[in-house]
Amino acid sequence: MQSILRQQIAFRCPSCATATIGFIGRLHSVSDMLRLKCECGEYALEIKGEKDGRVSLNLPCVFCKDTHTFTISGELFSRDIPTMLPCPHSHHDILFIANENDMPALLERSAGELSLVLSSFEADELSDIQPMEVDDAEAMPDPAIYDVLNFVMRDLEADGKVVCPCKKGPYELRFTDFGAEAVCSSCGASYKFYAMSGASAESYLEADKIELT
Ligand SMILES: [Zn+2]
Ligand SMILES: [Zn+2]
Ligand SMILES: [Zn+2]
């Protein structure tokens, strides 16, 4: 008998560092709002479906104690491969979307990462590594994501597999809140890469064509 794997979403609480896991279910209607609260009651992840099919997240961050806001493609919730979102300041993954089979391994890896960060700072307490203030202007995109997507673009371009209405190019890659966007310098057509972590960027290595619209 085959059972269908359910999609889960998880984050780690900035106060107690515990991972809280929820089932995603359906986020189809506009007003759907999911609130996933840590057992300690201090922090909660908020997920809200938007009109355009995207999903906005208010995500507490265990690394900087800030709440990060992301807007991601709703498609990320129904993909087969696990998706992680990194903290824009520390670049460590802080949100995990995966099916119930894959989730334990992701959280185990994140726990290892967290304890590594703690030990590298010789900090026993989470509060020791969380800066009091984080300047948003210093948030840097993950260079790994850029490298991968840049490679994808150049590789496909070399094979004539980047398709643009004007067929001219050249194409630029720029960072956005959902990952990156390839933009044609001649006509302004664009293609969105939904890639918030190195792993999700790598899934584009399998793309055989990029069509700008
Ligand atoms: Zn907690
Ligand atoms: Zn953060
Ligand atoms: Zn163009």
Image (cartoon, rainbow, N blue to C red):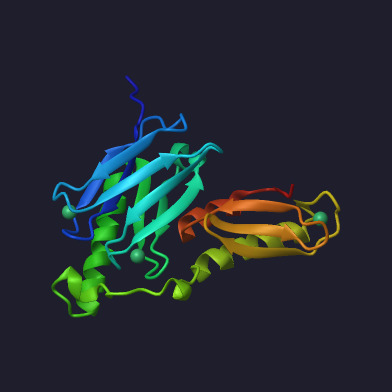
User: Residue 151 placed where, x, y %?
Assistant: 64, 64
Can residue 100 be seen in the rendering of this structure? no
Question: Does residue 191 lie above or below 175 as drawn?
Answer: above
Q: Nearer the viewer, residue 20 or 42?
A: 42
Can residue 6 be seen in the rendering of this structure? yes
Is 205 on the left-hand or right-hand side of 83? right
Is 107 on the left-hand or right-hand side of 48? left
Identify the residue shown where x is 46% and y is 29%.
29
Q: Nearer the viewer, residue 118 or 126?
A: 126
Classify the position of ligand 3 by quadrant: top left, top right, bottom left or bottom right.
Answer: bottom right
Is 87 on the left-hand or right-hand side of 53? left
Where is residue 48, by image quadrant?
top left
User: Residue 21 placed where, x, y %?
Assistant: 26, 43
User: Residue 176 placed where, x, y %?
Assistant: 56, 60
Identify the residue shown where x is 48% and y is 50%.
71
Q: Nearer the viewer, residue 105 or 150?
A: 150
Please identify the residue farthest to the top as the structure is shown: 1
User: Residue 44 placed where, x, y %?
Assistant: 26, 49
Q: How many marks?
A: 0
